[in-house]
Amino acid sequence: MPSGRKPDGDAALSNAERQARYRLRHQVGRTAGAIRARRPIDRRSRPQRWRDAVAELLTLQASYTAWLEALPDALRDTPTAETLQAIVDLDLQALASIEPPRGYGRD
């Protein structure tokens, strides 16, 4: 039956040497520990988040429109062009006209 790890040197470590290695190993782990960054809290109201999301969608739709217009004629019948056309055809102005309720009697 094995009696444990073989010593690194000629003789086994003393208790003090073993404890010193243990402390050094754990001290290095503590200083180089993982620092968890917290995600910043979104403090915008729901209506403001709605308006920001709709504005982002409108911006993306405009960039996809520019991409579709810049496609060469040879690529007009590709699946990419069809997908871009579907995005351009979406009526996002209806979303922009919606004003979500404020809630809790603040309407």
Image (cartoon, rainbow, N blue to C red):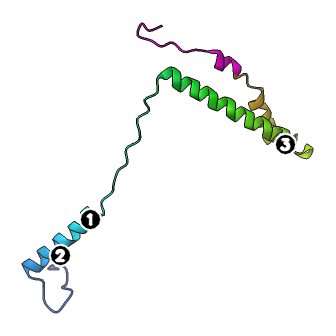
- Mark 2 belongs to which amino acid? Arg
The answer to whether mark 2 and mark 1 are in CB contact below 8 A is no
- Element type at mark 1: helix
Give the labeled residue for mark 2.
21
In depth, the one of 84 and 79 nearer the eye is 84
In the image, which disc is placed on residue 29? 1
- Labels in figure, total: 3
Q: Residues within 10 Å of mark 2 (few under 14, many from 20)?
A: few
Q: Earlier in the sequence, mark 1 or mark 3?
A: 1
> Which residue appears farthest toward the right when viewing the image?
73
In the rendered view, does 66 fall on the left or right side of 26?
Answer: right
| Drawn side of residue 49 relative to residue 86, left or right | left
Q: CA distance from mark 3 to mark 2?
A: 66 Å
Q: Residue at x 22, y 71 (%)?
A: 25
Quick one: quadrant of the N terminus? bottom left
Residue stretch rendered in magenta on the structure:
93-107
Q: Nearer the viewer, mark 3 or mark 2?
A: 3
CA neighbours of label 1 inside 10 A, class few (<14), some (14 to 19), many (20+)? few
Q: Amino acid at mark 3?
A: Ala
Identify which residue, 33 or 11, lies in the foreground: 33
* 106 is within the stretch colored magenta: yes
**Mark carried by residue 70:** 3
The residue under the point 70% across, 20% down is: 93
Vertical comparison of 29 with 77: above or below: below
Question: Quarter of the image holding residue 5?
Answer: bottom left
Q: Position of residue 76 (x, y in %)?
A: 88, 40
Most prominent secondary structure in the magenta stretch?
A: loop
